[in-house]
Image: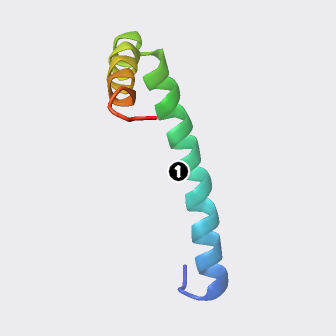
Amino acid sequence: MSNGPISQFSKDFVRLHVIKDELDTAYKLMAEDRKRELKALSWSEAVIGDFDV
């Protein structure tokens, strides 16, 4: 592909959809990892306690 404006638009458009699909799959796999989710929950609850409201 050339580096013209149409080419750049095409690259950006394709990249957006490819990355989104990869992220969706990665998040789904992480959510299915029960041990990882429990660790993340524990960490996030500890962090929330660090803030004064």
User: What colour scheme has been applied to the protein in the rendered image?
Assistant: rainbow
- Residue 32's spot in the image, x, y percent? 47, 16
Judged left or right of residue 20, residue 33 is: left
Which quadrant of the structure image shows residue 44? top left
Which quadrant of the structure image shows residue 6? bottom right
Q: Residue at x 46, y 33 (%)?
A: 26
Callout 1 environment at 10 Å: few (<14), some (14 to 19), or many (20+)?
A: few
Q: Secondary structure beneath disc 1? A: helix
Q: Indicate whether 1 appears above or below 40.
A: below
Q: Indicate whether 36 appears above or below 50.
A: above
The N terminus: image quadrant: bottom right
Depth check: 25 or 3 in front? 25
* Farthest bottom residue in view: 4
Which quadrant of the structure image shows residue 15? bottom right
- Residue 18's spot in the image, x, y percent? 56, 51
Amino acid type at mark 1: Ile
Q: Indicate whether 15 appears above or below 29.
A: below
- Residue 8's spot in the image, x, y percent? 58, 78
Judged left or right of residue 27, residue 16 is: right
